[in-house]
Every structure is written in structure tokens, then in C-alpha cells.
Image (cartoon, helix red, strand yellow):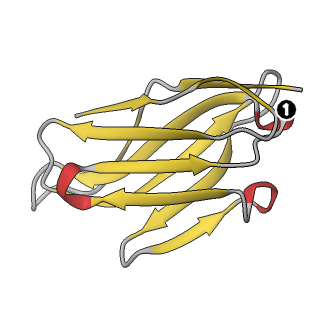
Amino acid sequence: VQLVESGGGLVQAGGSLRLSCVASGSIFIINDMGWYRQAPGKQRELVAHWSTGASTKYADSVKGRFTISRDNAKNTVYLQMNSLKPEDTAVYYCNADLRTAWYKEPTTYWGQGTQVTVSS
């Protein structure tokens, strides 16, 4: 199983970016998917999460600016980021809680990360 993120880059404050994460490989079913970020010298933190049943959760710092969405047919999760701030600068990682077979327990997989840099 692989998770591959894309869409990161350099943007000015107030700008927008859209991140994508595609899960591929031997996948039976994907339960939850989410986005995390890690800034230099800081711990990885939750940004947005999409639970089974389309329940979403956001970090307080991004509410109203970021939107998570998911395309189940494409095994893809997106993160639309608007009104970006310099403090949003970090490596963004996606993760997925999934089963590789009906009889196996769910396992969490992580992508390699994509850099988002917001200049002031």
C-alpha cells in the first residue's frame, strides 16, 4: 500500500493550495483518512480528519480556512487550503486507516509528505 501526496509548494500569505493524496495497492476498504502537518522543531499535529460516515474534524487553527474532502472511488483525499498564513508552513502528511483484506485488522499508513511554504 502506498499513499502519495501532491500539491504542495510555495505560496504568498493569503493564497491557496490544494493538496491531494492517493492511496494505491492492495486495498480492501479505507475507513478514515486525514491530514497532519509537522513544522520544524514541532510535533506532528492533526490538521483535518475524515471519518467513515463523512464526519469531519479540524484543528482550531485551520477552521474556516481549510476543507477536507474525499473521493472514495479514487481512494483520494484532498485538502483545500485558503487564506494561508506563514504559520501554516510545514510538511503535510496524509494518512489512511484501511484494511488490505476483509479478515485483516485495520492498519494506518502514511504518505511521504509534501512541503507547504507560506511567505509573508
Q: Can see residue 65?
A: yes
Q: Please give the count of numbered marks on the rendered protein.
A: 1
Q: Choose between 52 and 117: the one closer to the eye.
A: 117
Which residue corresponds to the image point at 52% horizontal and 41% vertical from the top-left?
18
The C terminus lies in which quarter of the figure? top right
Which residue corresponds to the image point at 15% horizontal and 35% vertical from the top-left?
25
Could you say which quadrant of the image residue 91 lies in?
A: top right
Q: Residues within 10 Å of mark 1 (few under 14, many from 20)?
A: some
Which residue corresponds to the image point at 41% horizontal and 75% vertical from the top-left?
54
Q: Choose between 109 and 83: the one closer to the eye.
A: 83
Q: Can see residue 107?
A: no
Q: Choose between 110 and 62: the one closer to the eye.
A: 62
Instruction: Residue 15 in the image: state x and y as whole percent.
Output: 72, 38
Could you say which quadrant of the image residue 84 lies in?
A: top right
Q: Choose between 66 and 103: the one closer to the eye.
A: 66
Report the residue marked by disc 1.
86
Q: Is residue 59 left or right of residue 93?
A: right
Instruction: Residue 79 in the image: state x and y as whole percent.
Output: 52, 49
